[in-house]
Image (cartoon, coloured by chain):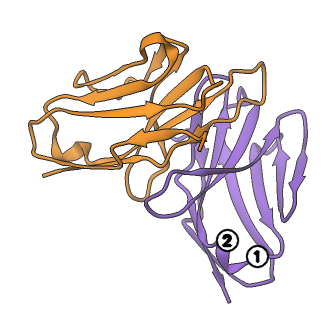
Chain colours: A purple, B orange
Amino acid sequence: DQQVKQNSPSLSVQEGRISILNCDYTNSMFDYFLWYKKYPAEGPTFLISISSIKDKNEDGRFTVFLNKSAKHLSLHIVPSQPGDSAVYFCAASDGNQFYFGTGTSLTVIP
Amino acid sequence: DTGVSQNPRHKITKRGQNVTFRCDPISEHNRLYWYRQTLGQGPEFLTYFQNEAQLEKSRLLSDRFSAERPKGSFSTLEIQRTEQGDSAMYLCASSQALISGNTIYFGEGSWLTVV
C-alpha cells in the first residue's frame, strides 16, 4: 500500500511563475517530511524538509507547507526557473524508514 | 567530496550471475539505507543499518538479496542469481540518527541491467 502519494505525474509551468507540487500521506505516525529533486541517471538531492510541529518552512525560492489535519503537504517554487525542471519526490518518515511518493515531473517552460 | 559514494555506477550482467554494489556513506553518519528505484516509481525501501546492525528489511526483499555493513562503515548489497526483474537503480543513502528531523542524503546510484 502506498503511504505517500503524488497524484500528479507531471506539471508544466511558465518561467517566473509559481510551481505547486502536492503530496498526500496516510500514516498519522509520520513526523518529518522532505522533498527531493531528481535529474535522470542521478540520485535524489535533498531540497527542503519540515517537522510535524510546524506548518511552513521556507528556504529561498522553496517553501513547504504542511496541513496535518488533511495529511497533505505541498512544495511551492517561486519564481520557477528552467533549471528547476526535474522529478520531485516527497517523502515522509516515522523516525526509522522513509517512504517516497511516485514523483511529479516538473517542466519549466522558458 | 564528502557525499555518499556508490560503485560501480553501472553494471550489466547476465541473468543468473551475482552482483555486488558498494556504498560509502558520509563519514559521520551512523545510519545507512538501501533503496531501489525503477522507472516511474519512487525509491522503494530495501533495508537499513544503524552502525553495523541491520535493523530492518523490507518484506519484499527476496532471499537473493543480502546486505552487510561490517564495522559500521561502508556497506555492500549483493544480489545472487540475478533476474531481469532486478534491473533497476540501486540507491544508497545515509543519515545521522536524531530524535527528530532525520534527513537522508543519497548517493548517485548504481544502475543494474540484467540481460
Image spot of residue B22 (x, y percent):
37, 32
Amino acid on which the number 1 mark rests in the picture = Ser
Residue A69, quarter of picture: top right
Using residue A27 as the reference point, say whether residue B38 is left or right of it.
Answer: left
Q: Quadrant of the C terminus of chain A?
A: bottom right
Amino acid on which the number 2 mark rests in the picture = Asp
Q: In the rendered structure, the residue with mark 1 lies on which chain?
A: A
Using residue A68 as the reference point, say whether residue A10 is left or right of it.
Answer: left
Which structural element holds mark 1?
loop
Residue B105 shows in this picture: yes
Disc 1: which residue: A80
Disc 2: which residue: A84
Image spot of residue B79 (x, y percent):
24, 31
Q: Confirm or deny contact between disc 2 and disc 1 (CB under 8 A).
A: yes
Q: In the rendered structure, the residue with mark 2 lies on which chain?
A: A
Image spot of residue B63 (x, y percent):
24, 21
